[in-house]
Image (tube, grey):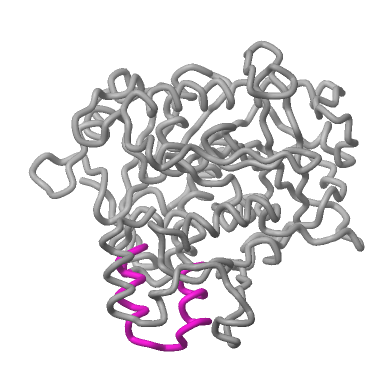
Amino acid sequence: MLTAGLATGLALTVPGLARAVPYDPENDDPDFHPVKFLLPAPSGRKALGTTAIHLIDQSRPDPTMPSGRRELMISLWYPASVAGSAPVAKYMPARTAVEVDDAWTGEWGLALPSGSFDFANTLTHARVDVPMQPIRHPVVLFSPGCQYSRFVNTAQVEDLASRGYVVVTMDHTHETPVVFPGGRFLPGVPASQLPDPDFTRKAVETRTADARFVLDQLERIAGGANPDAEGNDLPEGLRDGLDLRKIGMFGFSLGGYATANTLLEDERVSAGIDLDGTLRDDPAKGPLGEAALKGLDQPFLLFGSGDTQRTDPDKEYYDTSWAGFWAAQRGWKLNLGLAGSKQKAFTDYQFIFDQLFRAIYGDDPIITSVMKALVGGAQPDRSVWAQREYIAAFFDQTLRRRPSLLLRGDSPKFPEIRFAR
């Protein structure tokens, strides 16, 4: 999250940002209201459906859970055949929304009023539990950043689904905040445990096991089984809509590290993308992760921000893990950079922060400075567009065998995307 220094700087610069207490309608600003967000419209032609599934891994003990076993929540986002009158999915469950809001408005956050982020009433572009389009679709797994909910990259996920992919997003229990059926809630890992190399190593191993378990459950679904722990009906057509011969994975930050590790351990995953995630347990000291040491046989895209993870030791922001991976990689590889961006630009916060600050402060010039501090100087609409196009181009080329000119070199259409030399 933000450093204390940034929060203090914002509070000192903009008096309205100095309040970081729960909203009290009797004593606080009567004009204050939570901000709902508009997600960028997906660029594909498919209508969207989504469903959540509760999974229990009987092979992994977890005495903290009611079942005594490892439990996960996943969401599937998919091309829908019929939208009908099914409800539109909310951005995230209400309890998760409170937790995420607290992370940004609390002591170490943005010094905004508690409740500023109205994620629980923000709408996505997908309808809940509608039938899937009755053809087979490539499958892509997604792993979020450390402490980040599986919903915080929804704009990327919806866009891939609108282009004909089934995207499976995972919350990693005890690390990312998660709500289970019946309202049972588990918060993410406390910030006091981070950064910690031992935690990172264990988290990558756990995330890898989670991803492999989810793949097992997708195979069960394709075989006609229903792995939902409550026995809830799966969307019509899901069984026949998964093309498990074409599986990819991508992740943000720690999720990118977990993606590379999953490809190393599971050949079912044919291609992967790391969105600005170092491939070592300690960002400053190492050691390098197994994928950085050994490389992969599958195609892999390193997609970094403007100030992290570079492979050239003579340039700023050199990362030995990306350099090690680049040297060891056996499969097709590509290293892209989004100029002017910071790491959080690879999440929905790219446009969420912009909308939030403009809703509260209009066109105050401080917004530009705050946005640069949080996500960098890239324009939110262009940043979202560029990321969507290159992520889709990569999976189209590697899973669907549709070569893309975008992946061959610099494009005048996207001057903010830099190819590593």
Majority secondary structure in the magenta region: helix
**Residue 410 at least partly seen:** no
Q: Is residue 255 magenta?
A: no
Residue lying farthest to the left in this orientation: 314
For the point 37% across and 39% down, the residue is 192
Q: Tell me which segment is drawn in magenta.
A: 352-377
Label total for image: 0
Task: From the viewer's perspective, tell me whether residue 296 is left or right of residue 349.
Answer: left
Q: Is residue 146 left or right of residue 155?
A: left
The residue under the point 30% across, 58% down is: 4
- Residue 191 picture location, percent across and down: 40, 42
Q: Is residue 355 magenta?
A: yes
Residue 156, by quadrant, is: bottom right
Q: Nearer the viewer, residue 105 or 125?
A: 105
Q: Nearer the viewer, residue 346 or 18?
A: 18
Q: Quadrant of residue 311?
A: top left
Q: Residue at x 26, y 61 (%)?
A: 5
Residue that extends furthest to the front in the rendered view of this protein: 27
Image position, residue 274 (x, y; %): 41, 40
Specify whether 152 is left or right of 339: right
Q: What residue is shown at x 68% (from left), y 24% (from top)?
A: 65
**233 in relation to 210, above or below:** below
Position of residue 83 measured from the top left corner of the image (x, y, whole percent): 86, 59
Q: Is residue 361 above or below residue 409?
A: below
Quadrant hosting residue 73: top right
Residue 264 position in % (x across, y down): 44, 20
> In this view of the protein, can residue 92 be seen by the observer?
yes
**Relative to residue 190, is residue 79 depicted above or below?**
below
Left or right: 193 in relation to 262: left
Decide: is 39 above or below 270. below
